[in-house]
Image (cartoon, rainbow, N blue to C red):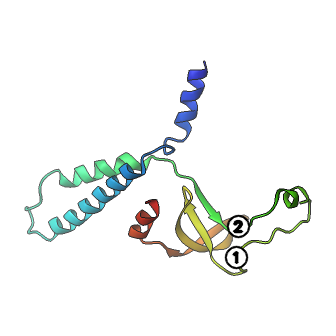
């Protein structure tokens, strides 16, 4: 029974424990295939290798179902345990960012974009104002 619970817990977040280098290799392969596809598109009609496009789609489909944790960070703060215990309703926690500074959008705790807070249908949202380039995102993984 405990093995079943462990298996269920492992299935909840298959992205955890994934080898970063393996993911980086897969991303690099996808980028190379995109570059090859661009070169293939420049060839005369009929010169494309049959099945190359389907192969690239199949590789991309392998990662499309991986769940990711997406969060927006307003700011951070450090405090002593005694200060944390003294917090109560109405307490204010000072953050390290200034008012009006962009929020950071994180995917699996890595910054991928910046944006501003908005309200959509009575819920908070983030309007993206700056997206980190794919190469910068890969650099963060190292």
Judging from the image, what secondary structure is the residue with disc 2 in? Answer: loop
33 w.r.t. 9: above or below: below
Disc 2 to disc 1, how far (Cα)? 8 Å
Residue at 91% x, 59% y is: 86
Q: How many marks?
A: 2
Disc 2 target residue: 76
Residue 66's disc is: none
Q: Earlier in the sequence, mark 2 or mark 1?
A: 2
Residue nearest the viewer, comparing 25 with 69: 25
Residue at 31% x, 59% y is: 28
37 w.r.t. 21: above or below: below
Looking at the picture, how far across and down is residue 105, in whole percent?
Answer: 58, 66
Looking at the picture, how far across and down is residue 139, in whole percent?
Answer: 42, 65
Q: Is residue 32 left or right of residue 134?
A: left
For the question of whether residue 125 can be seen, the reply is yes
Residue 97's disc is: 1
Question: What quarter of the picture does the N terminus occupy?
Answer: top right
Residue at 61% x, 60% y is: 71
Q: Is residue 65 left or right of residue 82?
A: left
Q: Quadrant of residue 133?
A: bottom left
Residue nearest the viewer, comparing 84 with 41: 84
Looking at the picture, how far across and down is residue 13, in whole percent?
Answer: 54, 42
Local crowd size for mark 2, using a 10 Å CA cut-off: few (<14), some (14–19), many (≥20): few
Q: Quadrant of residue 97?
A: bottom right
Judging from the image, what secondary structure is the residue with disc 1 in? Answer: loop
For the question of whether residue 121 can be seen, the reply is no
Looking at the picture, how far across and down is residue 126, in whole percent?
Answer: 62, 69
Residue at 67% x, 72% y is: 118
């Amino acid at each position: 029974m405990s093995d079943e619970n462990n298996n269920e817990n492992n299935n909840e977040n298959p992205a955890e424990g994934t080898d970063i280098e393996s993911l980086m290799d897969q991303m690099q392969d996808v980028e190379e295939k995109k570059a090859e596809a661009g070169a293939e598109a420049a060839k005369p009609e009929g010169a494309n290798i049959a099945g190359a496009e389907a192969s690239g789609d199949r590789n991309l489909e392998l990662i499309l179902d991986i769940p990711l944790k997406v969060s927006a960070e307003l700011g951070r703060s450090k405090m002593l345990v005694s200060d944390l215990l003294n917090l109560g309703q109405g307490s204010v926690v000072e953050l390290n960012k200034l008012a009006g500074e962009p929020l950071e959008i994180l995917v699996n705790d890595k910054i991928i974009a910046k944006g501003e807070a908005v309200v959509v249908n009575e819920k908070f949202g983030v309007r993206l104002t700056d997206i980190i380039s794919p190469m910068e995102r890969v650099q963060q993984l190292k």
